[in-house]
Image (cartoon, helix red, strand yellow):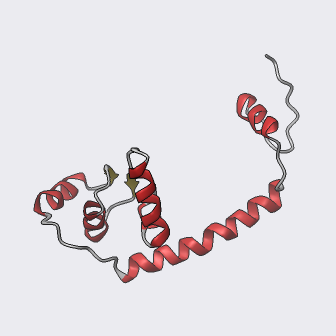
């Protein structure tokens, strides 16, 4: 999961639900020290980072302190929260909102999509 999406109440609930379900939670784009410390404090199962040595250093030095999200982190979170519905509307406008489950399965099997005329060959 994109680390910036885990900031805020929705992310906290998601992380609790993942742990409750016994699933692993991995975060990506964890590149700055504050995001790394925040991920460590939330006890995620792993991160994807461009600086794994730095992440391991911070893991070794972590003493259980609470890590707050920076203003930059909150602003990124807010921007993403506004962008998601906007792009959702664009996708709905372009592809429509009605798609049957059978069509989704067919598209997945043969690589078709809206506006393509493919015949199933199986």
Give the residue furthest to the front: 20
- Residue 4 appears at what percent x and percent y? 44, 66
Residue ID at (52%, 77%) = 78
Work out which quarter of the rendered image holds the N terminus and state it. Answer: bottom left
Residue 18 position (above or below residue 105): below
Tag count: 0
- Residue 68 appears at what percent x and percent y? 30, 77
- Residue 74 appears at what percent x and percent y? 43, 78
Name the residue nearer the viewer: 21 or 122: 21
Give the residue furthest to the top: 122
Quarter of the image for residue 91 reads: bottom right
Q: Using residue 101 as the reference point, say whether residue 11 is left or right of it.
A: left
Residue ID at (18%, 54%) = 56
Q: Using residue 111 as the reference point, say whether residue 9 is left or right of it.
A: left
Residue 100 position (above or below residue 55): above
Q: Using residue 57 as the reference point, say whether residue 52 is left or right of it.
A: right
Quarter of the image for residue 103 reads: top right
Residue ID at (12%, 57%) = 60
- Residue 105 appears at what percent x and percent y? 74, 34
Quarter of the image for residue 121 reads: top right
Work out which quarter of the rendered image holds the C terminus and state it. Answer: top right
């Amino acid at each position: 999961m994109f680390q910036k999406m885990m900031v805020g109440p929705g992310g906290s609930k998601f992380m609790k639900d993942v742990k409750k379900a016994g699933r692993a939670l991995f975060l990506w784009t964890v590149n700055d020290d504050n995001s790394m410390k925040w991920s460590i404090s939330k006890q995620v199962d792993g991160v994807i980072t461009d600086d794994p040595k730095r992440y391991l250093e911070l893991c070794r030095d972590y003493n259980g302190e609470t890590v707050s999200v920076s203003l930059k982190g909150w602003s990124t979170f807010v921007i993403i929260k506004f962008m998601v519905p906007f792009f959702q509307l664009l996708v709905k406008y372009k592809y429509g909102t009605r798609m049957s489950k059978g069509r989704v399965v067919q598209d997945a099997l043969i690589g078709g999509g809206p506006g393509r005329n493919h015949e199933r060959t199986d």
